Image (cartoon, rainbow, N blue to C red):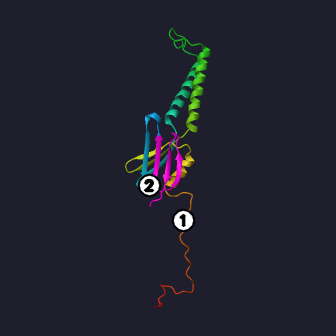
Amino acid sequence: MNDERELGWLRLSDKSQLVLTTGHVFQHQDYGMFGENRAIIPRRAITTVRLSWQRSRGVLVLGLILFLASLALIIANQMNQPEGFAFNTRLFAVSPSTLSLIQYGVLVAGLALIALFWLHKKNEIQILGGTGSIGGTPVNYEDAEEFCLLLMGAGKKPAPVAANVEPEPENSPKTTDPDWRL
């Protein structure tokens, strides 16, 4: 009889859990009225376990664009503008206080996006089997690392100790001795 015990679990940000047992890895996702998803991968069928984190390049690019645009607006406002270049036209009229508010608002938004790039990392765990995969975004990266170690068999629990074997007495004859006889 196969006794399947739970070894560990990992909570994901979409309110699902990965559950590791002695024989399988389970994931159940409930989408309410839109359905549910259940996946089971036998441990012997796991081919790859991937745990990754990355920062968003799009947030960095948008933050740098806003930052450089605000600097260009501030520098252009501080310099003497040519006669043909003015912010007051028939279609577009902006008061100096509104222009200043826009300049500094874009500067703050650009700096906030750059700070968000440095402070926010997207984590992901993915377990690939022969015919499918399970995974998602873990709530805690350290818990995900521990789960992966459990999954790969290098958990915190020590390996079971073999039966105590008594050491051979030193005065007993060795089988490698050339003068040994039966």
Is residue 107 magenta-colored?
no
Which element type, helix, strand or loop, lies under badge 2? helix
Quarter occupied by residue 95:
top right
Front-lying residue, 53 or 165? 165
The numbered mark, 1 or 2, whose residue comes first in the sequence reads 2
Q: Residue at horizontal 58%, vertical 20%?
A: 102
- Marks 1 and 2 close (CB-CB < 8 Å): no
Q: Amino acid at mark 1?
A: Pro
**In the image, which residues are magenta?**
1-29
Q: Which residue is mark 2?
A: 43
| Vertical comparison of 178 with 52: above or below | below
| Residue underneath mark 1 | 160
The disc labelled 2 sits on which kind of residue? Answer: Arg
Residue at the image position 43 percent from the left and 37 percent from the top:
35
Q: Residue at x 44, y 39 (%)?
A: 36
Picture quadrant of residue 121:
top right
Q: Secondary structure at mark 1?
A: loop
Q: Where residue 75 sits: x, y (%)?
A: 58, 22
Q: Is residue 12 magenta?
A: yes
Which residue, as the protein is rendered here, is positioned at the far front? 1
Name above or below for residue 55 compared with residue 86: below
Q: Quadrant of the N terminus?
A: bottom left
Question: Residue 39, percent across and down?
Answer: 43, 46
Q: Which mark is residue 28?
A: none
Alpha-carbon span between mark 1 and mark 2: 20 Å
The percent coordinates of residue 101 (x first, y second) are 61, 19
